[in-house]
Image (spheres, rainbow, N blue to C red):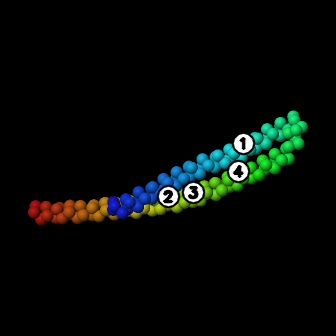
Amino acid sequence: MAKWVKSLIRISTFEVETLQKRLAEVGVRRTHAEMKIATLDAELQLEIARASEDILITQHMPAYKAGWAMRRQQAVSDLELVAHEEAGIRDELTGAFEELKKFEHVAEVTRLSRVAADLKRENAAMDEAALRFKKAG
């Protein structure tokens, strides 16, 4: 296999691995964003339960809910941003895999061509040897 093909395959493999690492990191960030939203929702339910028991907390619930809504909206926006980033990385990864497969295909076709040429030369040498043997015998 030609050095340039090996180099292209190594570079493409490195790019695929790098994108896979980025995708894993984004997946962790997505999980954290989803957990933050779930935590905020649980906190609201807890405060609603506490407000049903304490009149003072009930009076402050509208302000709490307004603050909660802003924090939740920010968390949802963060999640949407991470999801968009994840989709972009998945698209890049698909393209990188396609490029890698192209280079691997070129390498395989080159190898098979070389094997076929070697086989052709070997067959020609065997035919020539058989003709010499026939003429000598």
Please report whichever mark, 1 or 2, sits nearer to the chain's N-terminal start: 1
Q: Are marks 4 and 1 in contact (CB under 8 Å)?
A: no
Between marks 3 and 2 in the image, the one whose residue lies nearer the viewer: 3
Disc 3 to disc 2, how far (Cα)? Answer: 10 Å
- Residue designated by label 2: 97
Between marks 1 and 3 in the image, the one whose residue lies nearer the viewer: 1
Q: SS class of the residue under badge 4?
A: helix
Disc 4 to disc 1, how far (Cα)? Answer: 11 Å
Crowd around label 1: few <14 · some 14–19 · many ≥20 (10 Å): few
* Towards the viewer: 35 or 102: 35
- Residue designated by label 3: 90
Horizontally, residue 89 falls left or right of residue 124, namely right
Q: Residue at x 18, y 64 (%)?
A: 128
The tag on residue 39 is 1
Q: Is residue 28 visible?
A: yes
Q: Are marks 1 and 3 in contact (CB under 8 Å)?
A: no
* Towards the viewer: 86 or 55: 55
